[in-house]
Image: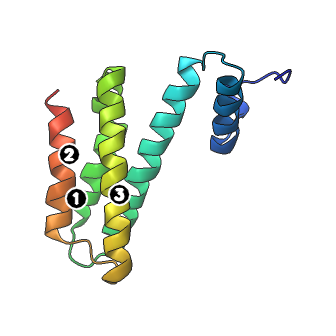
Amino acid sequence: MKKNFNSENLNLNDKENLIKALQQKQLEVPKKIVLEEIYEQIKDDFIYVVQALEKSPQQDKEIEDYVWEYLYGDTIFSLDNEKLIEFANEIFIYTQKLKMKLAKLDNIFDDDDWFSFKEILDKYEVY
């Protein structure tokens, strides 16, 4: 706990370990670290979806571009903390289901997968 932590020099594992250490000492976890971890998880999940899109012969480049634009647009950053956590949870669950599905079906990201993902995105874009 005596180490000088700076969020820029911490990777995801370091942040998780720091959060656990702070919780064990019953100290408040800095909000910035928690938010950075949430944004990092969202980014990782979006990257997985884009990679699935790239590998799938059934999807167009426009969908891939839309996902990148959504990720780096203002929508995610305009969510309040509660909505951001809900969004991160929904994207995480979606991505985990997609990983299981794609492992069975030769990486075919089909239209149903896209519409399920788009439904989540639209839900928070309207917010």
Query: Please, what is the three-letter code of the amino acid marked with disc 3?
Result: Thr
**Gap in angstroms between the C-alphas marked 2 and 3:** 11 Å
| Residue type (three-letter) at the residue carrying disc 2 | Ile
Circle 3 Cα neighbour tier, 10 Å, few/some/many (<14 / 14–19 / ≥20): some
Query: Which amino acid lies under the numbered mark 1 shown in the image of this protein?
Result: Ile
Labels 2 and 3 touching (C-beta < 8 A): no
Task: Identify residue for label 2.
Answer: 120
Sequence-earlier tag: 1 or 2:
1
**Badge 3 is on which residue?**
95
Label 3 or label 1, whichever comes before in sequence order: 1
What's the mark number on residue 118?
Answer: none
Instruction: Judge by depth and name the residue closer to the eye, 38 or 76.
Output: 38
The quadrant of the image that shows the N terminus is top right
x and y percentages locating residue 30 in the rendered image:
59, 18
What residue do we see at 67% from left, 44% from top? 13
In the picture, the quarter occupied by the C terminus is top left
Question: Could you say which quadrant of the image residue 48 lies in?
Answer: bottom left
Q: Name the residue under label 1.
A: 63
Residue 8 location in percent, x, y?
Answer: 67, 29
**Residue at 20% in and 45% down:** 120
Along the line of sight, the residue nearer the viewer: 71 or 122: 122
Residue that appears at 75% across and 24% down? 5
Tell me: 103 left or right of 108: right
Q: Which of marks 2 and 3 is nearer the N terminus?
A: 3
Residue 119 locus on image (x, y percent):
14, 48
- In the rendered image, the vertical position of residue 49 relative to residue 67, given as above or below: below
